[in-house]
Image: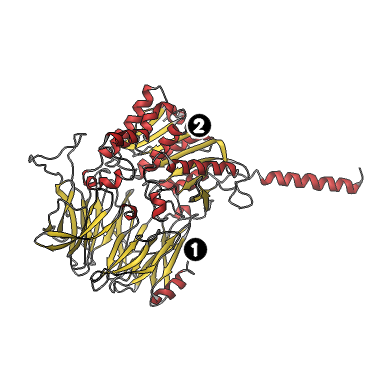
């Protein structure tokens, strides 16, 4: 062989070798589960009304609590709450500027109680300590489980005009309806404002005057009523069933004579509107033909509209008030990601800004408007910084009938060598289905997406018909389509992923919570040959019993459910619900199933999981059932999340072939129990 021929051959061999190596990229290091599902470092940064203090949530002895610091000295924060069990997840500043208010339930039962904490003395007062609802017979109402039915408190209005009082609703007298009280946050004294045996909602102004009341119509719409004296109400407006999920009140202006609304009446998508309450004249401020507008920004004291969000695949802000244009222009230069104004001082001098990314933690800044300076405060999870995370790619998938399904695809690091959002070869895939169903998937850091991608799976989330945010036609296309066209959309997305060369047809799992759990059960019963396995988290299996066991204060909303899911009150409706219930077809299940359930779930009762598990056992079908005695609709305690996802990770590895971190000590501190099927996951046998 001549020298130049050998050189050419060597070049060819080396190029072929290099080409082959390009498709053999080493997988990213395994990221520990606790990085994804343990407590965040710090989240929910807020500025006090007076602008002199900041607050955030951070762990204390492993439990999320509220910390407060001077705004000028954020490194000297002190903890002001001392929850030792579930942690605090919802809180805000009272207008006293010295009190934090938060909501807490009992082990996930959603029997919310309102607490006030003095940030100076650290004294914590339960403002709604009632533990039982007394029935007409004078005895506490008892649930089928034997537990006492506990009242739920809700916050109706907080006004800067009354810094020591808030307006609340509580159903301590009638479990179906919330009476309205003015509540003194210093003393806990309550004054009855409105006894209620009829209305699902009240709309109050800054003076704590109940301006409107709302009740559902038999057709699934809403009637808006106004007071006419002597505890009487008269009809003022109606929202038809087709608009009820895309139309709603936002706020009054400073005069109280105009209302801001998001309104889809007379159009498809919800527009931002102003309604003159004297003349009923409606003015459209802004609309987007693609999506419902959302998250309007309103000046804290002037009550003027300043900006509104438009969210198709990514967040876009529409500026309405030129006085904040320079603020937004500057803030867009501060950090990458989608930007949110999450808290403001009353004088509007300080803003708290959060930037969300798909490949990293949330970044928080304290923005001084007068100096046009944003000071970095912290990220939500420092352990995520610098890790090999994956981009969340927005994709629009066509459904079989032409609907566009806004979806999000995440691929394992190293699987897409040319970064075109297509892997170099088909991958095992997890179809991750959102709950609601009247919610939506969105772009940003998603711990389950990143965790599964790190384990070697493509992850696809689909905004199927019935999802919120894409106009009333899209959300109403899901009416009476549970287990039907809503599921067809998911199957269309799976077929798209296979056709695009993204997914290995033989290695696709379906997973989700709440409605996503129902979709998982539908996937294994209605389309038993499509998925290799399923993970159902607090999903209903029997639509009839689901609707018959909703929380008492949801019963006035029953027409919302019967017109969109099915009606258990009629024989025809019961037959229809049975035809859309996975339990009816449990015998069709061929593939492995993992179920996670909270024993105190008030929305999807434990019986929903028990029913499908029992049916599978009768048919000698394997199922792994994980039950948490101290959880409700989802798993809030990080110890329980870690435990459940340890089981899930090893379950998926067994059936899809991805990577798995050993369970290790991730059951430590968890209440996890296995009513059945632990042996079906080999990794559990040694635990």
Question: Are discs 1 and 2 less than 8 Å apart at CB?
Answer: no
Q: How many C-alpha atoms fall within 10 Å of the one at disc 1: few (<14), some, or many (≥20)?
A: few
Q: Is residue 669 above or below residue 342?
A: above
Query: Residue 161 appears in which quarter of the rendering?
Result: bottom left
Viewer-nearest residue: 47 or 477:
477
State which mark lies toward you, 1 or 2. Answer: 2
Residue annotated with mark 1 = 336
Task: Indicate the colouring scheme.
Answer: secondary structure
Q: What residue appears at the point 11 percent right and 59 percent down from the top-left corner? A: 231
Query: Residue 294 appears in which quarter of the rendering?
Result: bottom left
User: Does residue 35 appear in the picture of this structure?
Assistant: no
> Tag 2's secondary structure?
loop
**Furthest-right residue in view?**
2
Estimate the x, y position of residue 178 in percent, counting from the top left: 18, 52
N-terminal label among 1 and 2: 1
Estimate the x, y position of residue 189 in percent, counting from the top left: 11, 58
Residue annotated with mark 2 = 529
Viewer-nearest residue: 183 or 393:
393
For residue 236, side relative to residue 274 (left or right): left
Marks 1 and 2 sit apart, C-alpha to C-alpha, by 42 Å
For residue 446, side relative to residue 574 (left or right): right
Estimate the x, y position of residue 222 in percent, counting from the top left: 26, 54
Viewport quadrant of the N terminus: top right
Q: How many C-alpha atoms fall within 10 Å of the one at disc 2: few (<14), some, or many (≥20)?
A: some
Q: Is residue 58 above or below residue 371?
A: above
Estimate the x, y position of residue 41 in percent, counting from the top left: 39, 54
> Tag 1's secondary structure?
loop
Q: What residue appears at the point 32 percent right and 37 percent down from the top-left corner? A: 543
Viewer-nearest residue: 15 or 220:
220
Numbered label attached to residue 198: none
**Furthest-left residue in view?**
138
Query: Residue 497 appears in which quarter of the rendering?
Result: top right
């Amino acid at each position: 062989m001549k020298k130049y021929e050998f050189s050419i051959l060597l070049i060819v061999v080396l190029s072929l070798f290099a080409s082959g190596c390009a498709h053999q990229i080493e997988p990213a290091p395994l990221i520990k589960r606790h990085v994804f599902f343990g407590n965040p470092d710090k989240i929910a940064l807020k500025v006090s009304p007076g602008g002199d203090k900041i607050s955030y949530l951070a762990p204390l002895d492993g439990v999320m609590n509220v910390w407060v610091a001077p705004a000028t000295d954020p490194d000297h924060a002190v903890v002001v709450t001392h929850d030792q069990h579930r942690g605090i997840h919802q809180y805000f500043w009272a207008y006293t500027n010295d009190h934090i208010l938060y909501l807490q339930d009992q082990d996930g039962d959603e029997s919310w109680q309102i607490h006030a904490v003095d940030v100076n003395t650290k004294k914590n007062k339960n403002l709604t300590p009632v533990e039982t609802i007394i029935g007409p017979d004078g005895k506490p109402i008892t649930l089928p489980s034997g537990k006492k039915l506990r009242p739920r408190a809700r916050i109706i209005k907080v006004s800067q005009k009354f810094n020591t009082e808030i307006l609340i609703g509580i159903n301590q007298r009638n479990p179906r309806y919330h009476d309205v009280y003015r509540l003194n946050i210093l003393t806990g004294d309550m004054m009855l404002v409105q006894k209620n045996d009829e209305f699902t909602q009240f709309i109050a102004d800054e003076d704590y005057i109940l301006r409107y009341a709302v009740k559902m119509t038999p057709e699934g719409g809403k009637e808006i009523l106004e007071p006419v004296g002597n505890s009487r109400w008269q009809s003022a407006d109606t929202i038809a069933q087709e608009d009820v999920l895309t139309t709603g009140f936002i706020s009054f202006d400073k005069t109280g004579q105009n209302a801001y609304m998001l309104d889809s009446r007379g159009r498809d998508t919800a527009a931002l509107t102003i309604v003159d309450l004297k003349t009923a004249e409606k003015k459209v401020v802004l609309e987007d033909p693609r999506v419902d507008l959302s998250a309007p920004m309103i000046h804290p004291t002037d009550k003027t509209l300043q900006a509104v969000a438009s969210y198709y695949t990514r967040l876009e802000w529409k500026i309405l008030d030129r006085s904040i244009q320079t603020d937004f222009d500057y803030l867009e230069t501060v950090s990458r990601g989608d930007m949110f104004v999450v808290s403001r001082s009353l004088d509007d001098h300080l803003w708290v800004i959060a930037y969300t990314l798909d490949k990293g933690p949330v970044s928080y800044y304290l923005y001084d408007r007068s100096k046009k300076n944003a000071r970095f405060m912290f990220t939500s999870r420092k352990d995520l910084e610098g890790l090999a995370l994956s981009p969340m790619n927005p994709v629009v998938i066509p459904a079989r009938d032409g609907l566009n399904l806004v979806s999000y695809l995440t691929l394992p690091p190293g699987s897409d060598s040319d970064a075109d959002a297509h892997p170099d070869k088909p991958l095992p895939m997890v179809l991750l289905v959102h709950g609601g169903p009247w919610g939506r998937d969105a772009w940003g850091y998603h711990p389950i997406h990143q965790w599964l991608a790190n384990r070697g799976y493509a992850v696809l989330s689909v905004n199927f018909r019935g999802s919120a945010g894409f106009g009333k036609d899209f959300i109403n296309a899901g009416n009476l389509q549970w287990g039907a066209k809503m599921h067809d959309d998911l199957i269309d997305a799976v077929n798209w992923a296979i056709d695009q060369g993204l997914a290995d047809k033989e290695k696709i799992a379906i997973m989700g919570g709440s409605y996503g759990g129902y979709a998982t059960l539908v996937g294994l019963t209605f389309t038993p040959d499509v998925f290799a396995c399923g993970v159902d988290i607090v999903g209903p299996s029997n639509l009839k019993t689901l609707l018959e066991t909703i929380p008492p204060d949801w019963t006035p909303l029953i027409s919302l459910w019967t017109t969109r899911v099915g009606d258990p009150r009629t024989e025809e409706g019961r037959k229809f619900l049975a035809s859309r219930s996975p339990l009816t077809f449990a015998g069709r299940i061929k593939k492995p199933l993992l179920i996670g359930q909270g024993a105190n779930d008030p929305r999807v009762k434990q019986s929903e999981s028990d029913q499908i598990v029992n049916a599978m056992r009768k048919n000698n079908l394997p199922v792994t059932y994980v039950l948490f005695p101290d959880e409700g609709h989802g798993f809030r305690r990080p110890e329980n999340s870690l435990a459940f996802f340890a089981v899930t990770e090893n379950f998926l590895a067994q059936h899809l072939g991805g990577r798995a971190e050993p369970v290790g000590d991730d059951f430590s501190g968890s209440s996890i129990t296995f009513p059945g099927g632990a042996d079906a996951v080999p990794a559990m046998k040694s635990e």
